[in-house]
Image (cartoon, rainbow, N blue to C red):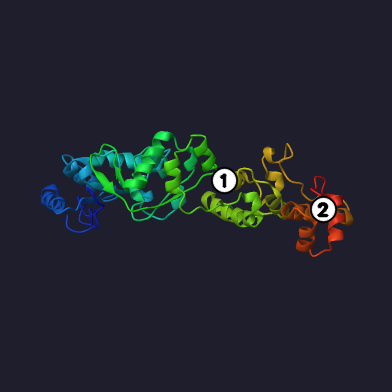
Amino acid sequence: MEKLPRIVFGTWAWGNDGTFGPALDEEALRPVFDAAMQEGTVLWDTAYVYGMGESEKLLGRFLRHVPRDAYMISDKFTPQCANADAENPVSEMFEISAHLLGSEQMDYYWIHNPLDAPRWVKKIIPLAKAGKIGKIELANGGTLFLDEIGELPPHIQSKLLQLIQEKTIERVSGTKRIELDIRLIVATNRNLEEEVHKGLFRSDLFYRLNVIRVHIPPLRQRPEDILPMAHQFLERFCKEYGKQLALSPRFVAFLEQYPWPGNVRQLENLMERLVITAQNPILDITALPLEYNSGGSAPDLPSQEGTLAERMDAFEGQIIRDSYRRCGTTVAVAKELGISQATAVRKIAKYVKDRKE
């Protein structure tokens, strides 16, 4: 099969009790299957929910004697039919469908209902990593995003280079090449030019990938993004775990000042962890894990004790330190805060211990 088919043959009425149309049996459907294959309709769409496995069973019988690279399967995970007590309901339903179809791999595997989709997407990932879902082929006609490209071992780098150059892939256990039309986006936190010089990354692959480069600064260099991301993660995880939480002013101050050495992933993981373990409806710095409050990794937070003058002094110090950390010079601090340079020099000398000038 050289190209992906433009027509998909649906089997939702196969083997059903008449709910989805006439009750057609194997004898009636065999000529339909044979004619479709002869005409080049080789992409078959089914799901366990279609007749509670009957559709897959019938299709599997027809496909039994057809070479695996001569057809494609589109199957689905239906949450309403899943075993909620299973460790991975998606994997369990996948294995049942794979057994009925007589195929260890699905070319397309869908979440059949948007209900709680983020939860099920996480469960699908192990199947994709195990090679049971054709990830690259799924991106045909769209965009393929490969994260941490700098971690690819040499033998995978050569395969990726071949994919880019030839724009084709070959399925596991297949014998024919499949043409692809994809937009490729890759990401890495490594300096690939240095990796090339060290012989750790192929130079030909680097130059193939390095067409349009977009540099995204680390999270600590774009503090304006921290709070919107934190709220987005909070909303997502509250929905996932059935909670309603808000952030205290002290926690917001912590988020904006913390250096985030692990970037966005660290922020995301922290928010999920706090949502899971939250005992109060308001997330405060008291809920932070120990590693965020030791070893000097956490930023100074304004004191919540003392007189009004002492608290105001603490807040002023925080503002000056934050501005100096961002701007780096007394002139820039003065401009940002709307004060004279002389005032900026005096206050930086008072509040910033490790100043540059």
**Relative to 335, 122 lies left or right:** left
Q: Is residue 84 visible?
A: no
Residue at mark 1: 265
Q: Residue at x 42, y 47 (%)?
A: 208
Residue 29 screen position, x and y as percent? 14, 51
**Residue 188 vs residue 6, the one in the foreground:** 188
**Relative to 315, 97 lies left or right:** left
**Relative to 37, 53 lies left or right:** right
Q: Looking at the rendered structure, which numbered label has been put on residue 339?
A: none
* Residue furthest bottom as drawn: 338
**Residue 232 vs residue 322, the one in the foreground:** 322
Residue at mark 2: 317
As displayed, is residue 195 above or below residue 111? above
Residue 197 screen position, x and y as percent? 51, 37
Amino acid type at mark 1: Arg
SS type, badge 2:
helix
